[in-house]
């Protein structure tokens, strides 16, 4: 799929004079849901569009009333994984769920007069217990640097008050590591995300809601220390002189 457009005609009648104007508007936000491991589109994922609702100095997101605009919300994507919503201007998030995958919630998507494209990476569920847990606080990742063995399961838990995320930095990954990239999407307080890292190397990542917050994971085999050779001692029988 790609970005769709729609043609709109606006007509105004004044003093029996009717004037019409045609224009093209974008269908936003839109994108493709794909498997972060294989890179292939995912069929059957449910995509919900959430609209920002501000009040009392706080901001919350609620399901956008798509039926008022002749649309469905949520949408179930087809084999190409493509979704699109034709929304008025505003601030939105998309939340995606699919059986067998960890859910994903996008950062804020601001719809104005420019295209809004957001591809959604879904990560398969990881049932294994975490070998390393990392807390995401409002001040950063704790610990910020960890060393683990290949095949380790890393679990990030949002321990802060604000929403946070963990997202690998693409330009820091080599070709062999690219298949082990990740993007948790926004995590609310107490929510977690798991990723298995099998390839040795150094992985850099950041909090998408605040890219200045970064972390590093070093994946390497544990070094084996050879035991020091023990000195052999020989004891001879004591012979007394007569």
Image: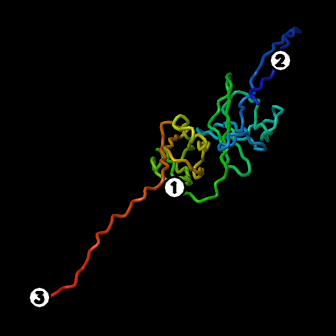
**Residue that lies at the very extreme toward the front in this rendered image:** 242
Instruction: Tell me residue 96's x, y (percent).
Output: 71, 43
Vertical side of 218 occupied by 225: above or below: below
Pointer 3 and pointer 1: residues touching (CB < 8 Å)?
A: no
Classify mark 1: residues with Cα within 10 Å, few (<14), some (14-19) or many (20+): some
Vertical side of 12 occupied by 148: above or below: below
**Residue that lies at the very extreme toward the bottom in this rendered image:** 242
Classify mark 2: residues with Cα within 10 Å, few (<14), some (14-19) or many (20+): few
- The CA span between labels 3 and 2 is 124 Å
Pointer 3 and pointer 2: residues touching (CB < 8 Å)?
A: no
At x 77% / y 19%, what residue is drawn? Answer: 24
- The CA span between labels 2 and 1 is 57 Å
**Residue 68 figure quarter:** top right
Classify mark 3: residues with Cα within 10 Å, few (<14), some (14-19) or many (20+): few
Q: Any mark on residue 132, and which?
A: 1
Secondary structure beneath label 1: strand
- The CA span between labels 3 and 1 is 68 Å
Q: Name the one closer to the observer, 239 or 87.
A: 239
Image check: 20 left or right of 53? right
Vertical side of 22 occupied by 97: above or below: below
Q: Any mark on residue 100, and which?
A: none
Instruction: Tell me residue 87's x, y (percent).
Output: 74, 30
Q: Which residue is mark 2?
A: 9
Q: Along the polypeptide, which appears first: circle 3 or circle 1? A: 1
Q: Quadrant of the N terminus?
A: top right
Pointer 2 and pointer 1: residues touching (CB < 8 Å)?
A: no
For marks 3 and 2, give the one nearer the viewer.
Answer: 3
Q: How is the image coloured?
A: rainbow
For marks 2 and 1, give the one nearer the viewer.
Answer: 1
Q: Which residue is mark 3?
A: 241
């Amino acid at each position: 799929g790609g970005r769709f457009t729609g043609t709109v005609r606006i007509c105004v009648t004044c003093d029996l004079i009717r004037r019409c104007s045609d224009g093209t508007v974008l269908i936003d936000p839109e994108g493709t849901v794909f498997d972060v491991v294989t890179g292939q589109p995912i069929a059957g994922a449910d995509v919900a569009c959430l609209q920002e609702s501000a009040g009392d100095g706080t901001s919350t997101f609620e399901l956008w009333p798509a039926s008022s605009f002749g649309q469905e919300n949520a949408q179930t994507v087809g084999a190409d994984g493509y979704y699109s919503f034709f929304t008025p201007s505003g601030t939105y998030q998309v939340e995606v769920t699919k059986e067998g995958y960890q859910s994903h919630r996008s950062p804020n998507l601001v719809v104005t007069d420019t295209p809004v494209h957001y591809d959604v990476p879904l990560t398969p569920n990881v049932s294994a217990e975490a070998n390393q847990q990392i807390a995401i606080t409002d001040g950063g990742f704790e610990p910020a640097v960890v060393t683990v063995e290949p095949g380790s399961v890393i679990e990030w838990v949002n321990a802060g008050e604000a929403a946070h995320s963990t997202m690998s930095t693409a330009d820091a990954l080599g070709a062999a590591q690219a298949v082990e990239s990740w993007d948790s999407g926004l995590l609310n307080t107490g929510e977690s995300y798991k990723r298995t890292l099998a390839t040795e190397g150094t992985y850099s990542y950041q909090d998408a809601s605040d890219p200045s917050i970064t972390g590093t994971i070093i994946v390497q085999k544990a070094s084996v220390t050879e035991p020091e050779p023990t000195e052999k001692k020989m004891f001879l029988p004591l012979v007394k002189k007569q």
